[in-house]
């Protein structure tokens, strides 16, 4: 297999719903960008916080791995043809190994990469087709077995889950139908039970709902008032000492708010504002203190910076090497539309 691969070898009636199976048949080298000049590390699996970077220009792929307060080490992966795009990168999403989910824009084919130590070539699996009207909306572990699973949505509101093990589909189920006017806006383990959950917002911002999952089923759901049209949901992450992931919001003025456990009853504000030129790349624990930090990118200067969140609520700044404008990061369980 060559290093440049033709790559890569991806589903609530009200807010709860019907049980049916998703369609089983298909509808059927370049400029080098600026990256830190750090020697490449081994392609190690899931050690510390990690971010996948891809150059659309060259097809190169690199993982930044953070451990403690040291600068990130860089693992160079295999280059990929431009028609392939990474949908999600999940550290330790394939057992002890990292998972990259790829989609081919021309064929719609989905492949899963298993990234592990000292691999000369990627280990990958090709997913069975799900039908052209389905798209992967999130990649996260819904059954606490150490393997990330796939959440699919389609335009009629159906939501389905495929559980995975060793890159193969174990179970498929449509878990419900949202009805019209709902969008999946974040995914994470909000109740701290080890199983991933889904946070939905109405498109008119009238209300929101979180689905707590247990494998390929909805264990519980909880409705709430939405934060409002002026608020954008940036990330899910661990921002306090309570179990479970929290939601990070930003309003048009740069104010930042946190909903502990995806619950507005446990809302708090951050002590500083975000700046308009900076975009959040990821929320991840860069310094291994048990709280997720915020990794920012300035699209005008290509500068990278991090807010290091301490247990006492203070925020320290950390500067990272810049990246070229053709490099984009993938790190979230949520898949962009």
Image: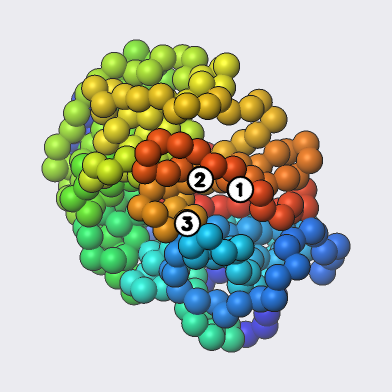
Residue name at image x 68 percent, y 79 percent: 3
Q: Are marks 3 and 2 in contact (CB under 8 Å)?
A: yes
- Please give the residue where the numbered disc 1 appears in the rendered image: 318
- What whole-number distance in Å separates the C-alpha atoms at marks 3 and 2? 8 Å
Which residue is nearer to you in this view: 259 or 217?
Answer: 259
The number of numbered badges drawn on the structure is 3
Where is the N terminus found, in terms of image quarters? bottom right
**Could you tell me which residue is drawn at 57 percent across and 60 percent down?**
52
Identify the residue at horizontal 46%, vertical 14% (top origin): 229
Residue sitting nearer the eye, 307 or 53: 307
Asked if one can make out residue 337 in the rendered structure from this viewpoint, the answer is yes
Q: Residue 254 lies in what quarter of the image?
A: top right
Q: Secondary structure at mark 2?
A: strand
**Pointers 1 and 2 in contact (CB under 8 A)?**
yes
Tell me if 61 is positioned left or right of 166 in this view.
right
Residue 317, horizontal then vertical, whole percent: 59, 43
Question: Vertical placement of 162 versus 294: above or below?
Answer: below
| Residue ID at (50%, 38%) | 315
Residue 128 vs 294, above or below: the answer is below
In this view of the protein, can residue 232 be seen by the observer? no
């Amino acid at each position: 297999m060559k290093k440049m691969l033709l790559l890569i070898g991806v589903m609530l009636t009200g807010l709860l719903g019907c049980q049916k199976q998703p369609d089983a048949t298909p509808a059927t080298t370049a400029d080098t960008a600026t990256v830190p000049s750090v020697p490449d590390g081994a392609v190690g699996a899931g050690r510390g916080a990690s971010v996948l970077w891809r150059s659309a220009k060259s097809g190169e792929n690199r993982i930044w791995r953070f451990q403690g307060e040291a600068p990130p080490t860089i693992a160079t992966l295999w280059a990929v043809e431009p028609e392939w795009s990474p949908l999600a990168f999940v550290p330790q999403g394939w057992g002890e190994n990292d998972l990259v989910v790829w989609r081919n824009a021309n064929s719609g084919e989905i492949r899963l990469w298993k990234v592990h130590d000292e691999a000369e070539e990627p280990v990958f699996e090709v997913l069975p087709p799900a039908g052209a009207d389905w798209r992967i909306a999130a990649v996260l572990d819904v059954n606490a077995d150490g393997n990330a699973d796939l959440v699919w949505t389609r335009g009629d509101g159906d939501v389905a889950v495929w559980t995975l093990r060793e890159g193969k589909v174990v179970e498929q189920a449509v878990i419900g139908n949202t009805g019209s006017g709902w969008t999946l806006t974040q995914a994470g383990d909000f109740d701290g039970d080890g199983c991933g959950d889904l946070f939905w917002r109405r498109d008119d911002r009238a209300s929101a709902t979180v689905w707590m999952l247990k494998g390929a089923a909805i264990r519980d759901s909880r409705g709430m008032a939405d934060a409002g049209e002026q608020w954008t949901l940036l990330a899910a992450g661990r921002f306090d000492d309570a179990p479970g992931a929290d939601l990070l919001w930003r309003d048009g003025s740069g104010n930042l708010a946190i909903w502990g456990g995806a619950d507005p009853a446990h809302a708090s504000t951050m002590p500083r504002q975000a700046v308009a030129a900076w975009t959040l790349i990821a929320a991840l624990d860069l310094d291994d203190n048990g709280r997720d930090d915020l990794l920012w990118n300035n699209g005008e200067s290509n500068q990278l910076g991090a807010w290091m969140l301490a247990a006492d609520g203070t925020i320290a700044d950390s500067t990272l090497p810049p990246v070229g404008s053709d490099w984009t990061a993938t790190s979230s369980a949520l898949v962009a539309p």
